[in-house]
């Protein structure tokens, strides 16, 4: 069975396009998919210059399109969402951020963070330690 991987790339400001963020995030997702035998889908969900602090990426950004595709069945359960860090999903309050991660995982998607290759799925988020390890970066990023 072929497992598909989708990348979600986000940075907050248009000025960051001039830097290395896009290339770095894409490279990490491509390397992870190749290393783990995942088929990287041609669809890449990118919120370039979109805030995760305000939740714009979840409400009207490409992350909202990813979530809609998951809910409609256009993206299969068991697929992977590859992100650089959890702060790419959200910089909102810990409760809101955990809710976004939880919604994705409850929909049957496996979330992998590229920097530490940490796996978030329905089994791992039931582990208190993993849940706390997810909450800490969300708290830190919300405070920045």
Image (cartoon, rainbow, N blue to C red):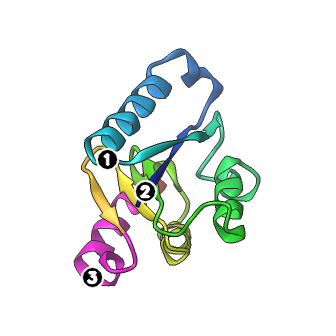
Query: SS at mark 3?
Result: loop
| Residue annotated with mark 3 | 127
Using the numbered discs, state the Cα–Cα distance from disc 1 to disc 2 in whole angstroms.
8 Å
In the picture shown, does residue 102 fall above or below 114?
A: below
20 with respect to 93 (left or right) = left
User: Residue 12, position in %: x, y?
Assistant: 58, 37
- Upstream in sequence: badge 1 or badge 3: 1
Q: Is residue 58 above or below residue 78?
A: above
User: Is disc 1 in contact with disc 3, using a CB cutoff of under 8 Å?
Assistant: no
State yes or no: residue 130 in magenta.
yes
- Taking the spot 57% from the left edge, 21% from the top edge, the residue there is 17
How far apart are the two marked residues, 2 and 3, measured between alpha carbons?
24 Å
Between the C-alphas of marks 1 and 3, the distance is 26 Å
Residue 131 showing in the rendered view: yes
Q: Is residue 8 within the magenta segment?
A: no
Of the numbered discs 1 and 2, the one sitting upstream in the chain is 2
Reading the image, the residue beneath label 1 is 37
Front: mark 2 or 3: 2
> Disc 1 vs disc 2: Cβ atoms closer than 8 Å?
yes
Quarter of the view holding residue 110: bottom left
On the image, numbered disc 2 is attached to which residue? 3
Q: Position of residue 19 (x, y in %)?
A: 48, 18
* Segment colored magenta: 121-140
Tell me what residue is drawn at x 43 percent, y 56 percent.
3
């Amino acid at each position: 069975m072929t497992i598909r991987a989708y990348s979600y790339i986000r940075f907050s400001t248009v000025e960051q396009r001039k830097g290395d963020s896009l290339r770095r995030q894409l490279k990490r997702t491509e390397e992870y998919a190749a290393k783990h035998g995942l088929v990287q889908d041609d669809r890449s969900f990118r919120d370039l210059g979109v805030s995760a602090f305000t939740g714009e990426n979840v409400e009207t950004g490409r992350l909202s399109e990813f979530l809609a595709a998951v809910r409609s069945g256009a993206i299969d359960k068991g697929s992977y969402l590859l992100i650089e860090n959890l702060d790419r999903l959200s910089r909102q309050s810990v409760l809101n951020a955990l809710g976004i991660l939880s919604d994705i995982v409850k929909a049957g998607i496996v979330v992998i963070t590229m920097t530490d290759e940490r796996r978030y799925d329905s089994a791992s988020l039931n582990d208190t330690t993993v849940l706390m390890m997810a909450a800490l970066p969300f708290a830190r990023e919300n405070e920045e």
